[in-house]
Amino acid sequence: MPNCNFNCPFCSNSSLIKKIESLPSIDPQIIEDFITKREKFIDGVVITGGEPTLQPDLPEYIRHIKSLGFLVKLDTNGSDPKMLKDLISQKLVDYIAMDFKAPLDERYAKVTGVPMDLESVKESIKAIYDSDVDYEFRTTVCPAFLDEKDIEEIARSIKGAKKYVLQQFVPRDTLDPALEKVAPYTKEKLEQMAKTCNRYVKTVLRGV
Ligand code: SF4
């Protein structure tokens, strides 16, 4: 599902965000055939993007995938709390991974590259936090935007959450080409950040 309502300069899905009109459309039946033929090896399907909650028929689509017997994980930027609440209340998602881009103030707009409706993001965080669905919050730690203090602030604001993931920034195919010159934090630095975050919430690293 291409397209996104955020424009994170470090986004490594730039091919799914830019020039979406040039992307091929894949018949859902092809996807269904692909997964059902491999059902012995596939437990679940990840619905990702871009931003999947931009698709108004998302609940219907997930309901169909679940009727085939698959678990569903949703990746989201948390911009549509209403859609998230609907999916949760209808028990359509088995796992949610929500991006927590930055501390919840003017830094959020800098990291997402668009003017922000922070109340919607906060509402999504609360809906996930309060739900009985398995979930994680995750932050891509791009050194151009976030430092150790920012990451600690995020962790503090989700104190007691089930899981927090610090994702390594990959300086490749970024939406803003200038970020391809930015060196990621070292593994040691990220480990130090995770150690600090673990005071508030169970934190793991990804991509290091
Ligand atoms: S990182 Fe995620 S939220 Fe940001 S532009 Fe890319 S797909 Fe959208």
Image (tube, helix red, strand yellow):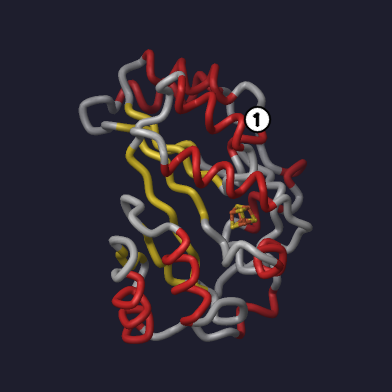
> Tag 1: residue type?
Gln
Q: Quadrant of the N terminus?
A: top right
Residue lying at 35% horizontally and 65% vertically, measured from the top left? 206
User: Along the horizontal axis of the image, is 92 left or right of 198?
Assistant: right
Taking depth in this image into account, of 29 and 199 the one nearest to the observer is 199
x, y percent for residue 14: 64, 58
Does residue 125 sit above or below 105 in this rendering? above
Does residue 203 sit above or below 38 in this rendering? below
User: Along the horizontal axis of the image, is 66 left or right of 173?
Assistant: left
Residue lying at 52% horizontally and 58% vertically, measured from the top left? 100
Q: Quadrant of the C terminus?
A: bottom left
Q: Which type of secondary structure does the marked residue at label 1 adopt?
A: loop
x, y percent for residue 190: 37, 79
Does residue 107 sit above or below 27 in this rendering? below
Taking depth in this image into account, of 109 and 208 the one nearest to the observer is 109
Residue located beneath label 1 in the image: 55
Does residue 77 sit above or below 86 in this rendering? below
Taking depth in this image into account, of 159 and 73 the one nearest to the observer is 159
Residue lying at 65% horizontally and 30% vertically, measured from the top left? 55
Give the image quarter of residue 44. top left
